[in-house]
């Protein structure tokens, strides 16, 4: 049996993650691509940390930070009257943090590929920095933006460890499609698990395929 509630929650989580994270990733990636701030290597290492940190370790620290005994979790509970951990909002915050490298790194590489003389020529032609960003840089960095969107969306759909640690398994609130698949496997319901896994595979493949098709079409035009 397909868990449509878990699927809708996963799609909502992935959509909000992409919507919130991509603008922030553009700012961070552009800054790192065109500047050499002190400690740049340290900043890039911190950005890449979720790629190599075990999900249970990453999830544990987030769970502690979102809990009522930490200032972040305590402040959220004081404001909204509910715990930050084991809520959709906490799950979204965790999703934003664990997807930082998937959003920033493709965009940074795309901005770094833009020749410096192209930006300088735009400034010499009278374009402001904002117009240069909007009319020159972003069109050239479009493949990186498309890749960041696809990777962030697909990774969010399939994330399991951090989601389970921070969100738990609350139906309609934090139970994603990945956790629902795990539950079906634990219950030896291979038919339902297989159907949900196949659907998740299809959605992830179509997401990546459509985004890269749009990127290629934009590049050709």
Image (cartoon, grey):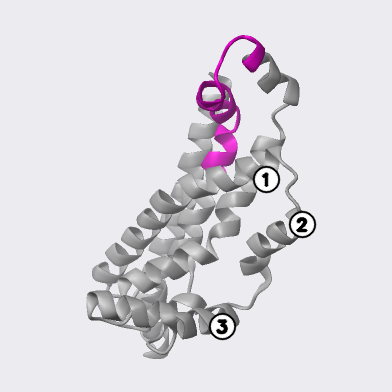
Q: Position of residue 221 (x, y in %)?
A: 53, 18
The foreground one among 80 and 192 is 80
In this rendering, does residue 205 appear at all? yes
For the residues labelled 3 and 1, the Cα–Cα distance comes to: 29 Å
Q: Which mark is residue 32?
A: 1
Disc 2/disc 3 C-alpha distance (Å): 25 Å
**Residue 179: which quarter of the image?**
bottom left
Q: Residue at x 58, y 11 (%)?
A: 126
Q: Mark 3 packing: few (<14 Cα in 10 Å), some, or many (20+)?
A: some
**Could one spot residue 191 in this view of the protein?**
no
> Which of the marked residues, 3 or 1, is nearer the chain's N terminus?
1
Residue furthest out toward the top: 125
What is the crowding at mark 1: few (fewer than 14 residues within 10 Å), some, or many (at least 20)? many
Residue receiving disc 3? 56
Query: Residue 42: x and y, percent?
Result: 74, 61
The reply, left or right, for residue 77 in relation to residue 104 is left
Mark closer to the chain start, 2 or 3? 2
Q: Residue at x 50, y 43 (%)?
A: 209
Q: Which numbered mark, 2 or 3, is in the foreground of this view?
A: 2
Residues at marks 1 and 2, CA–CA distance in whole angstroms: 10 Å
The quarter holding residue 3 reads bottom left
Q: Which residue is mark 2?
A: 41
Q: Quadrant of the N terminus?
A: bottom left
Magenta stretch encompasses residue 131: yes
Asked if residue 109 lies left or right of residue 176, the reply is right
The secondary structure that dominates the magenta segment is helix
Q: Which residues fall within the magenta stretch? A: 123-147
64 over 36 or under it: above or below: below
Task: Identify the secondary structure beneath mark 2.
Answer: helix
Q: Secondary structure at mark 3?
A: helix
């Amino acid at each position: 049996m397909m868990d449509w509630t878990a699927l809708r929650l996963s799609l909502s989580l992935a959509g909000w993650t992409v919507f919130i994270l991509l603008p922030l990733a553009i700012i961070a990636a552009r800054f790192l691509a065109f500047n050499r701030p002190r400690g740049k290597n340290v900043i890039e290492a911190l950005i890449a940390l979720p790629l190599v940190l075990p999900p249970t370790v990453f999830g544990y620290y987030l769970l502690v930070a979102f809990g009522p005994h930490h200032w972040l979790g305590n402040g959220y509970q004081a404001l909204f009257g509910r715990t930050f951990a084991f809520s959709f909002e906490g799950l979204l915050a965790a999703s934003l943090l664990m997807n930082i490298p998937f959003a920033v790194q493709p965009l940074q590489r795309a901005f770094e590929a833009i020749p410096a003389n192209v930006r300088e020529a735009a400034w010499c032609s009278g374009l402001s920095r904002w117009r240069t960003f909007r009319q020159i840089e972003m069109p050239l960095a479009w493949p990186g933006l498309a890749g960041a969107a696809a990777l962030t969306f697909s990774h969010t759909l399939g994330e399991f460890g951090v989601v389970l640690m921070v969100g738990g398994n609350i139906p309609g609130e934090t139970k994603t499609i990945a956790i629902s698949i795990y539950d079906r496997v634990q219950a030896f319901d291979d038919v339902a698990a297989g159907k949900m896994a196949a659907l998740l595979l299809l959605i992830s493949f179509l997401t990546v395929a459509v985004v890269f098709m749009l990127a290629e079409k934009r590049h050709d035009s």
